[in-house]
Amino acid sequence: MNKLVIANLLHRPLRSLISITAVAIEVVMILSIVAIFMGMLDSQKERTNGIGADVVVMPSNASMIAGVGGAPMSAKLAGFLAGLPHVTVAAPVITDFNMSSAVEILYGIDYKSYDALRPFVFLSGGPFQTPDDVIIDDIYARSGKGYRVGDTMSIKNHTFRVCGIVENGKGGRRLVPIDTLGGLIGSEGKASVIYLKSDSPANDNLIMEEVHGTKGLANYRVQTMEDLVSQYTPSRFPGFDIALDVVISIAVIVGFLVIFQSMYTAVLERTREIGILKSLGSSKATIVSVVLRETALLATAGVVLGIAATYGVRALLHIKFSTFAFELTAGWMGRGILIAFAGAIFGALYPAWMAARKDPIDALAYE
């Protein structure tokens, strides 16, 4: 029977190839959208956590997504917060969502206070020397043609000079002086968020109580950094679950229809063959197993091709956008494989049932 299954697939190579490609497309669609979104999410989570703050202060209407909420509060508030008991550092930051060359979040920082949260690790160059300096991380430095200290780049239609290259993992990939970025986006003297460093993690709750107890700050969002990064999950981002369900549904429909059409046509073409098998005593279960085994082989080949193609997509994206995070996880890879197999098997069930019901006499007389 196994030889028969393989021979049937090789007898119509183009149809088999189309079926394999459909399953592969299904796998690529599922894995790619998850890898892109989860990669961006986990990368931002890791870099946010790497800032080194203990407590985060934001306006009440601020979004948890950095760079989306603008810069609605006064940067001078950092001076007041720095004077609270148990606060050792208060660093005002502007985060600005930028899509000029790639999707990124620009950071406008007060270098002295931001560095005090957790010191930068410079690989070359050093801190800001002028308002038109920019610090970039090592990943961004390797992007494109590569950047070195002294090179220039355009940010918000403004020319900046690379003054330093640092290890990645401390907020943004490109950081400029807060006053300069504030001027470029029309938010002079403003901040999106203020990061606080406590004298001891045990005092984080006391700091939050002090902030909320201050007149005018009662409605501000104040939370520990641990709480903030814990919210970086797909369920917290509106539309992600819906978008993922839509993509998976489309992918499953594509795989289902192609497999259904392929196996349905195959059953019609092999009517006499099925009649011979049944006349020789093959049971309905045997006939069904032949069709499903063919489907399983097509699905297996499609899954392998789909996974290889997904890694190819990742390699191409890395070449084109080296700062772009594309995260392939074993969990989602397993889900993608199961979804692809399920769609293929369901697509073959009716053709298999139709083949099993054929009357051997009618099948042998079929022209």
Image (cartoon, helix red, strand yellow):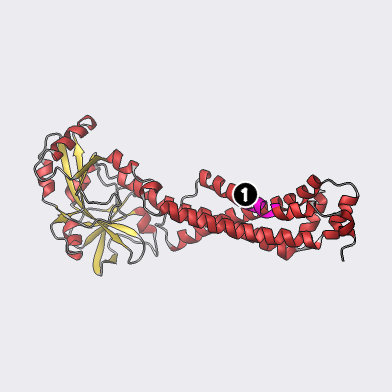
* Residue 262 horizontal/vertical position (percent): 71, 61
User: 199 or 136: which is nearer to us?
Assistant: 199
User: 117 or 16: which is nearer to us?
Assistant: 16
* Residue 328 visible at all: yes
* Residue 271 horizontal/vertical position (percent): 83, 59
262 relative to 65 in the view: left or right: right
* Residue 320 horizontal/vertical position (percent): 44, 63
User: 245 or 39: which is nearer to us?
Assistant: 245
* Residue 113 horizontal/vertical position (percent): 17, 46
Identify the residue shown where x is 52% and y is 53%.
Answer: 31
* SS for dot 1: helix
Residue 155 counted in the magenta span? no
Identify the residue shown where x is 71% and y is 64%.
Answer: 15
Identify the residue shown where x is 25% and y is 63%.
Answer: 161
Q: Which residues are magenta?
A: 340-349
* Residue 309 visible at all: no
Q: Is residue 258 above or below residue 229?
A: below
User: 314 or 288: which is nearer to us?
Assistant: 288
76 relative to 262 in the view: left or right: left
Residue 345 counted in the magenta span? yes
Quadrant (top left, top right, bottom left, bottom right) of the C terminus:
bottom right
Q: Which residue is mark 1?
A: 342
| Residue type (three-letter) at the residue carrying disc 1 | Ala
Identify the residue shown where x is 72% and y is 65%.
Answer: 14
- The total number of labels drawn is 1
